[in-house]
Image (cartoon, rainbow, N blue to C red):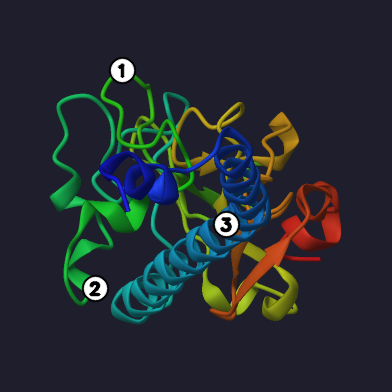
Amino acid sequence: MSTASKHSGRAFTLLELLVVMAIIALLAALLLPALSRAKQRAGATTCSNNLRQLSLAFVLYCEAHNDTFPAPGSRSVYGPQPEDWIWWHPGRDVTQSAIVPYMSRFNAKLFRCPQDLGAGSPALDYPYSYSLNSLDLEDDINPGMSSIITQDRKLYAFKTAQVKNPSGKIMLVDEDRNTIDDSRWAPGYENLISARHNRRGVVALADGHIQLVLPKFGLEEANTRPTL
């Protein structure tokens, strides 16, 4: 057999190449959605684990502070305060946050959802993903869930015993990037739960359990007002 015959026997024809390329394209089309779903699930799992650890730190903080919640870390109305659950304002060291001593091991990534594309950016006003449910004072009454400390250091404490039906009350929120501007989640200001986990967001309820919910869950007063 000649050398030319040998080479022609091993070469791919144009049709064979097109078939191989079509098969590769088909496999990619089948695999990419599965990979995307796996990434979504992994992101939701990490986010849930973050909030689970933060929720436990809140429980330990409250136990060590006469069953009283920390301050919300308000942008300006009530903050900054030494008792803010997270120190995020410019010039503040996040490692000094009120709940940090109650975390088993500090890691700033615990404050960030892996699928929050803005989290961690120093250009953002608030570079983290999670916020604490905190309603405004009403005639010198604090409806919860954070304790409120005014700029003149007047304390309006909110205690764990004041939460009714803690298994159904939002404590911490994986907040929508379009509404989050500080570490205080105030439903009255149309702050929203994110929809980055397959159209759902993660919340930590007051009893410590974690739940994936639709954003509308945060629009219902029965879920957001601790004393109802």
Q: Residue furthest top?
A: 123
Q: Give the residue at mark 3.
A: 40
**Tag 1: residue type?**
Ala
**Residue highlighted by disc 2:** 102
Q: Residue at x 28, y 36 (%)?
A: 88
Q: Is residue 83 visible?
A: yes
The percent position of residue 196, horizontal first and vertical second, equals 62, 46
Q: Separation of disc 2 and disc 3 at Cα?
A: 29 Å
| Residue 71 percent location from the top left of the image | 40, 50
Query: In the visual, does 105 lie left or right of 56?
Result: left
| Residue 123's disc number | 1
Residue, x 47% and y 26% (percent of image)?
77
Coordinates of residue 78 in the picture (x, y in percent): 44, 33
**Mark 2 or mark 3: whose residue is earlier in sequence:** 3
Front label number (3 vs 1) = 3
Q: Amino acid at mark 3?
A: Gln
